[in-house]
Amino acid sequence: MRLAAPLERLIEALRKLPGIGAKSAQRLAFHVLRGSRDDARALATALLEVKDTLRLCTLCFNVTDIDPCLICADANRDRSQVCVVEEPHNLIAIEKSGFRGLYHVLHGSIAPLRGMGPDDLKIAPLLERLRDGSVKEVILATNPNVEGEATAVYLSRLLKPLGVRATRIALGLPVGSELEYADEVTVGKALEGRREI
């Protein structure tokens, strides 16, 4: 069955979003259709505002509408710690944990198969931030996959000559899980990251 062309275009546009398949896109499109014109306008305005007003913080490279971002401008933050993450959405997860230091967003990870090398990441600005000696620890919170591990190892080698302590977030079993369902790599990382109690 063919749908009206504007509805088809909306469904196709929604399908381009991550995690949205054909059925979800269709459900969303019909939801927009059933909603009020004001709701549709608010959605369209919010989408355009994100594209028109957001930029990267010149200090940490997080997404922001002001420069420096609210985190970098917060005088109550521990400026001796910088947590390095791959993407801005990774920062949100760390922030929810109660971390009170600063951040640095790389905007990717070293992934030769995807054509991403160290020069494609925000590594040079990170090293520049560390030159004044005020940062004592860099927490490498890259993703626990091959690319994230490669990025963490690469960064740790760059940080060593600067005299900055480089630490890696502990990796392992999530709280509430059971050992029998964990893969051997996860169990191995949990054993490596063990601590005294």
Image (cartoon, rainbow, N blue to C red):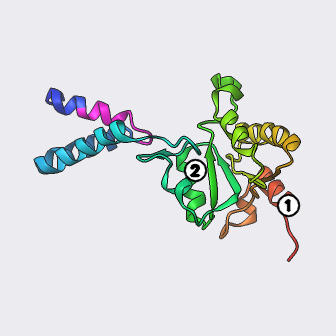
Residue carrying label 1: 191
Which circle, 1 or 2, is nearer the viewer? 2
Q: CA distance from mark 1 to mark 2?
A: 24 Å
Say which amino acid is labelled 1.
Leu
Q: In the drawing, what numbered circle is on residue 101?
A: none
For the image shown, how many numbered marks are present on the structure?
2
Residue lying farthest to the front in this orientation: 132
Q: Position of residue 89 (x, y in %)?
A: 52, 49
From the viewer's side, name the closer residue of 84 and 163: 163
* Front-lying residue, 118 or 22: 118
Q: Secondary structure at mark 2?
A: helix
Q: Give coordinates of residue 156: x percent, y percent.
A: 82, 43
The residue carrying mark 2 is 90
Say if 24 sits above or below 95 in the image: above
Residue 103 pos. (x, y %): 62, 51
Give the class, few, some or many, for how many residues have Cα within 10 Å of label 2's Cα (few <14, many ≥20): some
Tell me the residue at 24%/34% (across/down): 10
Q: Say if 124 sits above or below 188 in the image.
A: above
Tell me the quarter of the picture where residue 116 sits: top right
Q: Is residue 12 magenta?
A: yes
Amino acid beneath label 2: Asn
Residue at the spot 44% in from the left edge and 42% down from the top edge = 19
Q: Secondary structure at mark 1?
A: helix
Q: Which residues lie in the magenta part?
A: 10-19
Which is the main secondary structure of the residues drawn in magenta?
A: helix
Membership of 29 in magenta stretch: no
